[in-house]
Amino acid sequence: MKNLYTIFTPLSAVLTTVIAIALTAITACTSEQPKAEEGAEAPEKMVGEWELNSVLISIKTAHRTGGDSVINFPTPADWVKLMQQKPIHTVYRADHSYEATYRNLKDSIVALRLGVWAMPNDSSLQLFQQDPFPDTSYIDVRFLKDGAEFRRFRYDYDNDGNKDDEFFGIQRKISSSK
């Protein structure tokens, strides 16, 4: 299996776009794995501000090369170092709209993803991105004490025509008042 450093350079142009789409819902600031949370209704738990913590993407047979690749940002510092962007900041509003903001290290907005979200049950998040282009994401979610785990399966991150790639991310909820 190739590591991040051997695939990052050839994929850098594609990665920013792919990760931006994949991470619309991802965010958290500590590398500790929080404990699962019980209680509040799932849609109510989503409302608020979230920030990227960690990301792991497994790409099967990357770009039809026959080998698997892993993209791993275990901490926000790793994300900043390799992507040259601040951790993604996502706001989920009570009206079911969302906004994911991508900022460079000078705090200028480099990308903005807007759409609506739904939770048909307490472990499924659906994102219907409307701007800058239409995209739909179906994500398994598990709420934690101060954040959430997000898993996205059956997606084609490397655009090889096969929906065989997987995404796992942790985000931290930084505010419930949106």
Image (cartoon, rainbow, N blue to C red):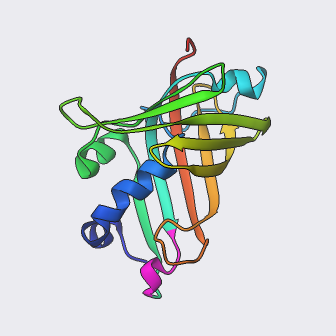
Residue 71, how many percent across, how many down? 41, 62
Q: Quadrant of the N terminus?
A: bottom left
- Numbered marks: total: 0
Q: Is residue 150 visible?
A: yes
49 to 139, vertically: above or below? above
At horizontal 43% and vertical 58% (from top left) the residue drawn is 18
**Is 172 on the left or on the right of 118, as rendered?**
left
| Residue at the extreme bottom of the image, as rendered | 66
At horizontal 55% and vertical 30% (from top left) the residue drawn is 98
Q: Which residues are magenta?
A: 59-65
Residue 175, how many percent across, how many down? 52, 16
| Residue at the extreme top of the image, as rendered | 177
Question: Is residue 107 inside the magenta stretch?
Answer: no
Residue 140, how many percent across, how many down? 69, 47
**Is 52 on the left or on the right of 130, as rendered?**
left
Q: Nearer the viewer, residue 19 or 151?
A: 19
Residue 23, how many percent across, how many down? 48, 46
Q: Quadrant of residue 76?
A: top left
Q: Nearer the viewer, residue 87 or 112?
A: 112
At horizontal 55% and vertical 42% (from top left) the residue drawn is 130
